[in-house]
Amino acid sequence: MKKLVLSSQEQNGFTLVEALVVVALISILAALAIPSFSATIANQRVNSAAQDLQILLHFARAEGVYKRTQSTVAATGQTWQAKVGTQVLREAALSDAVSVEPGSSGGVVFDVTGQARPASGGGTSYMVSVSGANASRVQCLTVTGAGLVRMRSAATKEACS
């Protein structure tokens, strides 16, 4: 009985067919994963924008109480500003990939005790809705009359209320 022994030159590397099969499998798996990644990325952008707004609102409230003066958070397009009087203390420039719908024009005003009210008057709370094109979630920010800033997540089909 003869033993078949391969030399070291015959055992090295992959064949072209094996390499093409591996590349094809990776391509198929990537094509299946891309749609879920785009939704995940869109949801992350929405979350990030909502967190930026939440931080800005907390900052404006704290600065108003600390400086014993009225502070305001208002939007100009995708740029939100925290102000004391006419002085801009901090800005949050949101990505164009998200859309932000403020509950009322004029933003929200925090008084010296930290209580809040919509700048346009009327109502005791202020609401902002942050959404994205491919996102499956909407982030709802609410500023209560007591000045508490709350964020909750809702499905895209639900409205912030």
Image (tube, grey):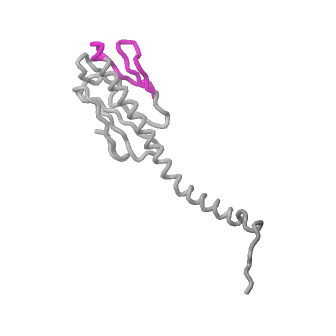
Toward which corner of the image does residue 116 lie, by quadrant?
top left
> Foreground: 157 or 29?
29
Q: Is residue 88 magenta?
A: yes
Return the x and y of residue 113 as percentages of the image width and height.
Answer: 23, 18
Return the x and y of residue 9 as percentages of the image width and height.
Answer: 77, 66
- In the displayed structure, 12 sits above or below 77; it is below
User: Residue at image x 34%, y 33%?
Assistant: 128
Return the x and y of residue 86 as percentages of the image width and height.
Answer: 39, 12
User: Residue at image x 46%, y 48%?
Assistant: 39
User: Residue at image x 42%, y 34%?
Assistant: 49
User: Residue at image x 36%, y 28%?
Assistant: 55
Return the x and y of residue 51 as percentages of the image width and height.
Answer: 38, 34
> Foreground: 142 or 102?
142
> Foreground: 77 or 28?
28
- In the displayed structure, 133 sits above or below 85; it is below
Toward which corner of the image does residue 76 lie, by quadrant?
top left
Judged left or right of residue 1, residue 160 is left
- Check the picture and name the quadrant holding the N terminus: bottom right
User: Is residue 9 at least partly visible in the picture?
Assistant: yes
Q: Is residue 1 magenta?
A: no
Judged left or right of residue 153, residue 30 is right
- Check the picture and name the quadrant holding the C terminus: top left
> Foreground: 62 or 138?
62
Judged left or right of residue 72, residue 95 is right
User: Is most of the magenta stretch helix, strand or loop?
Assistant: strand
- In the displayed structure, 33 sits above or below 126; it is below
Q: Which residues are magenta?
A: 64-92
